[in-house]
Image (tube, grey):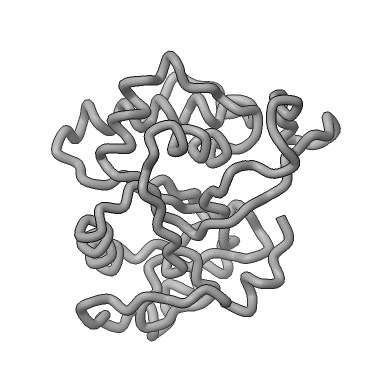
Amino acid sequence: MDLPVPELEGYRAEKAMLFFSQVLQQYPSVEFVVKAEDGAYLQPQRLLMAADQWAAMQADYIGCMGFSKVANSARRLTHERYAHLLSAEYPMRALNPIYVLSRRAVESVARNAGRLRLLGGADDTSVALWMLRITSKYFDDQRLCATACRNNTVAVVSPRRPEGLDARRLASTAVNSECAAEAAWPLPYSARGDPELLKQRI
């Protein structure tokens, strides 16, 4: 999907907003929209299984939830130009390179596009604010941020690289037998506390 937005850090929130609007136009019956970086190894079959569970619980904003400090230094690439309007931390948000929005959430973003604030950092910080506006139902799904394939992994990410896995890790993950194994239904949930993710510093 080609979007008429510059491929620059300062335009990521604007690009995400346009992406959501375009998805609704092209796929009007969509139930969930997945936003993932190239470095997230996503397993489509398990994603569909998880989506059935999200629909049953009426979740609107799904990801590996947490908090991070506002980037208030002008020397940082993702400098937050609205840091003076925020506290020391952004609102709770999906921290890893993949998150999911329900149709209700995406429709609200598209409908209110002209009234939603675009923060200066990554698009996920803006999405966190938008989700507060519509009183969305959050679900902290650790299956979206596994550091290795397990029987319930939906996505494999890197705890030390915000953009996800490098090419070598993507290739090795693709041939991992645990990733290729057929998942059981219902797809088991994951408890918070992956030892690799606990080492992550945001």
Nearest the viewer among 148 and 197 is 197
State the residue at coordinates (42%, 72%): 174
- Residue 115 falls left or right of residue 82: left
Residue 82 lies, in percent from the top left, at 69, 25
Question: Could you say which quadrant of the image residue 73 lies in?
Answer: top right
Residue 80 lies, in percent from the top left, at 71, 30
Give the total number of marks visible in the rendering: 0
Nearest the viewer among 52 and 34 is 52
The quadrant of the image that shows the C terminus is bottom right
The outermost residue toward the left is: 29
The outermost residue toward the top is: 114
State the residue at coordinates (54%, 36%): 123
- Residue 121 falls left or right of residue 61: right
Question: Could you say which quadrant of the image residue 63 lies in?
Answer: bottom left
- Residue 4 falls left or right of residue 123: left
The relative height of residue 122 versus residue 22 in the rendered view (above or below) is below
The quadrant of the image that shows the N terminus is top left
Residue 32 lies, in percent from the top left, at 27, 47
State the residue at coordinates (53%, 41%): 124
Decide if residue 52 is in sight here: yes
The relative height of residue 191 versus residue 164 in the rendered view (above or below) is below
Residue 86 lies, in percent from the top left, at 69, 32
Nearest the viewer among 180 and 130 is 130
Question: Could you say which quadrant of the image residue 162 lies in?
Answer: bottom right
State the residue at coordinates (75%, 26%): 84
The relative height of residue 155 versus residue 84 in the rendered view (above or below) is below
Decide if residue 100 is in sight here: no
The relative height of residue 96 versus residue 112 in the rendered view (above or below) is below
